[in-house]
Amino acid sequence: MGLKRKIGLLAGAAVLLVGGGSIVSATQDADWLRTRLVDAVQIKTGRSLHIGALHVWILPYPWVEARDVTLSGAGGLGEDVLAIGQVRARLSLLPLFSHRVIFRSVSIVQPRVRLHNLPDSAVAQDQGDDTQAASGPTQGQLHWNFGLSDCTLTQADISWDDEQAHLTGALKLSQARLTGLDGAMTDWNVEGEKGHGHFVLTGQTGPLLSMGEAPLALALRLALKVDGRDAGMAHLDGALSPSGGQEGAGWGYRLTVGGSLAQLADLNVFFPHADLPAGQNVSVDLALDGKGDQPGIQRLHARIGALDIGRWLQGASLTSLSVDANSPADPVALHLVGQVGGQPVSIAGSAGVLGSLTVRPQELPVDLSLEQGAAHLHVSGVAGVGHSALDMQGELEDLAPDAALPALKGVRVNAHVDSPDTLRLLAAWDAEQVLAAVSGVGDVSARSLTWQGTGWSGVVAHVVAQAGQFSLAPLTAQGSGIAQAARVDITPAVDGPHFAVQLNPVMLPLSAVQTWLGLPQDMRGNLLLVGSVSAQGRDTATRRQTLAGHIGASVVDGGVSATLIKALLGPQAPRLNGWMPVRCFGAHMQFGDDVAHINPLGLQSDFVQLDGNGSVAMGSGALDLHLSPRIQLGAASAASRIRVGGTVSAPLPALDTDAGGRYGVTIGGDDGSADSCPALLSAVREGVAGPAAPPKKSGKGEKIMNLLQGLGLFR
């Protein structure tokens, strides 16, 4: 045996003897290791580490096992952020000679992670004493350093609850492996599930254990699957830079973010509260260079294909949308293609400069053109979270946002809108708040307007909003052979805005009015309204209670359902079915003290005439109507008096007394030749001209007898 070999064997024996002694003293004393682990975590994180059981073995290689491990929340508040049933790790041998404990092949089985962000006031605490106590070794003890080289998590359960941002969530990691934690680069391989979704995160970062001491490089890739199919991918590249000890400076970052999704709604699997609409072919490419909450956007490219936006704008759909800017000095180019009410629409132009998007508050120059065939509407000005001022000029050939709303043709707009606080305007939820946050003036016209079968032509409106006041004056149009006009004024007041409406006259489809009032569709035709009313208040009940004024409502050549006739005349009319034509209907209403007083009230068909008066309590819907129905019997007639009580939704008709206090039915006395429609319409229309009732037709005996039998007059 050579001399060199003998010397090597002796040196190896000495190393094993000395090192083995150090290893034995360093590993068999589990309480010693537990104490230093707890102190190291306290110094690094300010949180308390609890280890229920800790065992150390030397053979066949040094390794350690811990059970019932928990890590406390901030300041000991709330539940533990980490709970682990079992942790196993190997100990590197050579670092022990330098009083360094390096864990390798760390295996964490079924950890539970609970991230809870409490309000600032709840985590205010004084940890000075604890930190000072754990800031270094006790006198006479050696200082040991701890390190970690690689770590594997299996079946991890992670959840978070951010009370400040109101965000909650949870996911499961089937496996997460991080290697090279003590080196220059850390390798990531993380797999997890969320409902029917599966994701894989791979890539590299800089040294995580020394994060905050040097820039942290990032090169991460994310792949998503939903129901076993590829759903999308994303990447994050760049670096994070520490603040350098500057108070409140935050991290600096230079990042490139990108990704694509085949179906936008697939993200709902991973974020179930997002409620994202259906969308296709989504892609984003974004470059950032900033610090803290001041991101500097260097590049932006975003694309989306078909997107369902019907929840925000009924009858609208998006075919494609692109947003592009190559540098901070470039304008943000927008291009949108879609449909509104079945009509193709495109928007092209720019909204600000990319570099200015990071300045708050900001005013972005806006230059957009909404195109519809050869017609276009141009919008220009500035828009920002603070001040916004926009000018709109142009025309659109068709504007039909939804079947339930009016459809316009040949729309022309010339308007200016200004808001000193755009965020306040966007957050406004009622008319008073909107008017307080916006001012403007505009002229709008339309060649024609159609709404639920009713048509108008030559529609013209002048709108003014200033200092909380609103005026729509005038609103004029031609329809049903008559000139129509209306005026609406809203004035701010301490007790709520004051509303005033004038109708001189206005024709509206009965179906829309009945829907707005929450009434059943018991009448057909067009409702002519004339008069003026006013109200004040911030809620519906107050405005109803302060409603004052008068309105005349009339219908000619319409229809009434048998259901309504039965409700007014009584349940003894089972043979009435379907609809009955109405030559004219009229009601003049005087409003005050939450009651609508009606006089006159009349209806005339080919064989039924109804006259009366009464009142309706607008709050409760209570009825107090006195009606005189007359049934035409060829050259004669049958008449009675009926009082209707109950409510609008549940009328209660009963026979009423005549002037002498008697009940009864009068037969004969009216040959039906008189036409009561002209007098009725003149009274309720307050002298304003309107469409005339159609000519009377001859009665039909069979229908009359059926009606009389239904009323119990003949059996």
Image (tube, grey):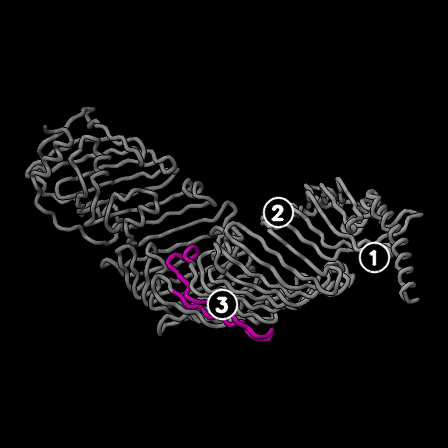
Distance from the alpha carbon under mark 3 to that under mark 1: 53 Å
The residue shown at (50%, 45%) is 495
**To which residue does mark 3 refer?**
303
The three-letter code of the residue at mark 2 reads Asp
- Secondary structure under tag 1 reads helix
* Range of residues picked out in magenta: 309-338
Q: Judge from the rendering whether residue 318 lies leftward or rightward of residue 213; answer left or right.
A: left
Secondary structure, magenta segment, majority class: strand
Residue density around tag 3, few if under 14, some if 14–19, many if 20 or more, within 10 Å: some
**To which residue does mark 1 refer?**
95
Mark 2 vs mark 3: which is more N-terminal? 2
Mark 3 vs mark 1: which is more N-terminal? 1
The three-letter code of the residue at mark 3 reads Arg
The residue shown at (27%, 51%) is 528
The residue shown at (33%, 54%) is 404
Residue 82 position (above or below residue 434):
above
Q: Nearer the viewer, residue 526 or 587?
A: 526
Q: Looking at the figure, which quarter contains the C terminus?
A: top left
**To which residue does mark 2 refer?**
157
Whole-percent x and y of residue 387?
56, 63
| Residue 463, numbered label | none
The reply to whether the magenta stretch includes residue 288 is: no
Distance from the alpha carbon under mark 2 to that under mark 1: 33 Å
Foreground: disc 2 or disc 3: 2
The three-letter code of the residue at mark 1 reads Pro
Q: Nearer the viewer, residue 702 or 190?
A: 190
Q: Which residue is situated farthest in the left direction here?
A: 635
User: Is the C-beta separation of discs 2 and 3 under 8 Å?
Assistant: no
- Secondary structure under tag 2 reads strand
Q: Judge from the rendering whether residue 686 lies leftward or rightward of residue 489; answer left or right.
A: left
Residue 68 position (above or below residue 296):
above
